[in-house]
Amino acid sequence: MILDTAGNEQGPSVIRWVPFHLSSVLSHLATERKFSYRHIASHAQKLCDTIRDSKTYSGNGWEGIFVLFLLARGLTGTSDEYFVPSKWFLENPKVLYNAPYESRRLFGHCENWQELLKGVTLGAEPQLSILFPTNSRFATYGVLAVYSKDCENKSIYGYQLKEGSASTAKIGANGEIERSFWVQGKSPDNAESKKHWRQSIDRQILWRIGKALDA
């Protein structure tokens, strides 16, 4: 990942992640009427601020980084053939963040992916919706990506963003979702809950996310 340093005559003393500097740029883009992705720019700016202000290992910063990664991949139409497949970009989909949704109030009350998807308006034209649930009790997944076309779900990826050692909870990935990723940390140890999860390793995560956000 790109890093920037700030220091004095004795040398660098502070390391800053360059995307932090994007906050003011995104804030400006969010007010530009001619910019078609101003809604996403507004939310991306808030994610940058959350990452900057989050406490170490709080989880909030890590979640924000991964959602920014998905948005960056979506908006640039680039795939890593792992978290983000190239098939989503064969027809230049419209990229949306927490939309289109029938009600912001209902979105905030959803506690699982089945409830969440009921309120998503599927695209007649190719559409990629990045859904970052706001309910702290939302089960199983931290963020979902839904690719739709002809008003049908064509592909759904789910991402669990918990950190740390293996979870003792029985958090099983849903077999109806095309791919389920336990992005960081370790998936549950019990065999039934472990089923359907794709386990990532730190080196893969850093490389893929770094490449997306440095672009």
Image (spheres, rainbow, N blue to C red):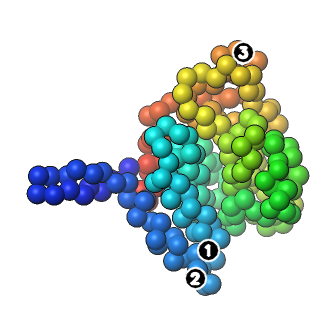
Residue 184 quadrant: top right
Q: Residue at x 41, y 56 (%)?
A: 214
Q: Residue at x 30, y 56 (%)?
A: 4
Q: Which residue is mark 1?
A: 38
Q: Residue at x 86, y 46 (%)?
A: 115
Residue kind at label 2, given as amino acid type: Glu
* Badge 1 density bin: few <14, some 14–19, many ≥20, Cα 10 Å: some
| Lower sequence index among marks 3 and 1 | 1
Q: Position of residue 5 (x, y in %)?
A: 26, 55
Q: Secondary structure at mark 3?
A: helix
Q: Are marks 2 and 1 in contact (CB under 8 Å)?
A: yes
Q: Which mark is residue 15?
A: none
Q: Are marks 3 and 1 in contact (CB under 8 Å)?
A: no
Q: Which mark is residue 32?
A: 2
| Lower sequence index among marks 2 and 1 | 2
- Furthest-top residue in this view: 190
Q: Position of residue 205 (x, y in %)?
A: 49, 39
**Which dot, 3 or 2, sits closer to the camera?**
2
Residue kind at label 1, given as amino acid type: Arg
Horizontal placement of 149 versus 39: left or right? right
Horizontal placement of 118 versus 206: left or right? right
Q: Which residue is mark 3?
A: 191
Q: Position of residue 2 (x, y in %)?
A: 35, 54
Q: Nearer the viewer, residue 137 or 128?
A: 137
Q: Secondary structure at mark 1?
A: helix
